[in-house]
Image (spheres, helix red, strand yellow):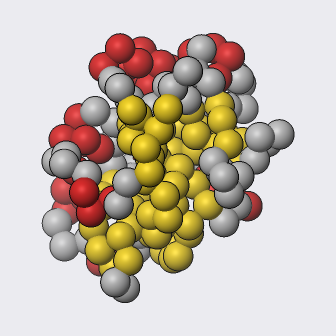
Amino acid sequence: MINFIKTDPARIQENAIDLIGNQWMLITAGTRDSYNTMTASWGGSGMLWNKPVMFVFVRPQRYTYGFLEANDTFTCCFFDHKYRNALRFCGANSGRDFDKAKETGLTPAETESGSIYFSESRLILECKKLYFQDLDPNGFLSPVIQKNYPLNDYHRMYVGEITTCLIQDK
Ligand SMILES: Cc1cc2nc3c(=O)[nH]c(=O)nc-3n(C[C@H](O)[C@H](O)[C@H](O)COP(=O)(O)O)c2cc1C
């Protein structure tokens, strides 16, 4: 039985660049009956409007995008290295084609407020959407940035207030 301890997000003792950029996360949105998850390594965490927040960046063609649009909350789940292959799978395949939980063995579960996370996570950040904005190429101040968008499929940025932070009790 995996237990989680509710923590103040300000007490997380991790480097956000390593955590998100190197260890990756699963972004999950939806309900128990209808949800999707995808791997992400671009994003950030900090303070905005006096609230602890996550920033995530999702391209419009992701199946997860529709779930982020349709739901008020999402979760960012972080895992031990042994789940790296599961995250690889969720970052290389679409929920349109696969049941990612079934394929990876990850176990979906519901937070008290009904967001979906995975029981195997070592850190879960439940977020309430506060803001979104599509990246605007007019704002790119370096030509290198556009190279990420040969299809002009600019990410939608979601800012989510971290409403619950759960750390696995090991
Ligand atoms: C390491 C890694 C990081 C990724 N980061 C992002 C990201 O930050 N934003 C994004 O839109 N896609 C990102 N992707 C791509 C999606 O995870 C991938 O397209 C996935 O298959 C989408 O699944 P879906 O169609 O079920 O939503 C990443 C993939 C990998 C492997």
Task: Give above or below for 35 relative to 151.
Answer: above
| Observer-nearest of 60 and 69 | 69
Q: Quadrant of the C terminus?
A: top left
Q: How many marks?
A: 0
Q: Which residue appears at 68% of the width and 57% of the height?
A: 113
Which of the two residues, 119 or 88, is positioned nearer the viewer here?
Answer: 119
- Quadrant containing the N terminus is top right
* 139 on left or right of 128: left
Above or below, 28 against 44 in this view is above
Is residue 111 at all visible to an observer of this figure? Answer: yes
User: x and y percent of residue 54 in the render?
Assistant: 39, 62
In depth, the one of 87 and 153 nearer the eye is 87
Q: Image quadrant of residue 140? A: bottom left
- Residue drawn at (29%, 74%) of the image: 47
**Residue that appears at 39% across and 32% down:** 169
Task: Specify the farthest residue to the bottom.
Answer: 49
Outermost residue, right direction? 33
**Can residue 138 be seen here?**
no
Is 62 placed above or below 45 here?
A: above
Q: Position of residue 14 (x, y in %)?
A: 19, 46
Please state the horizontal and vertical placement of residue 69, each as a whole percent of the image. Answer: 67, 62
Left or right of 133 on screen, residue 71: right
Residue at point 68% right, 16% down? 102
Please tell me in which quadrant of the rendered image residue 162 appears. bottom left
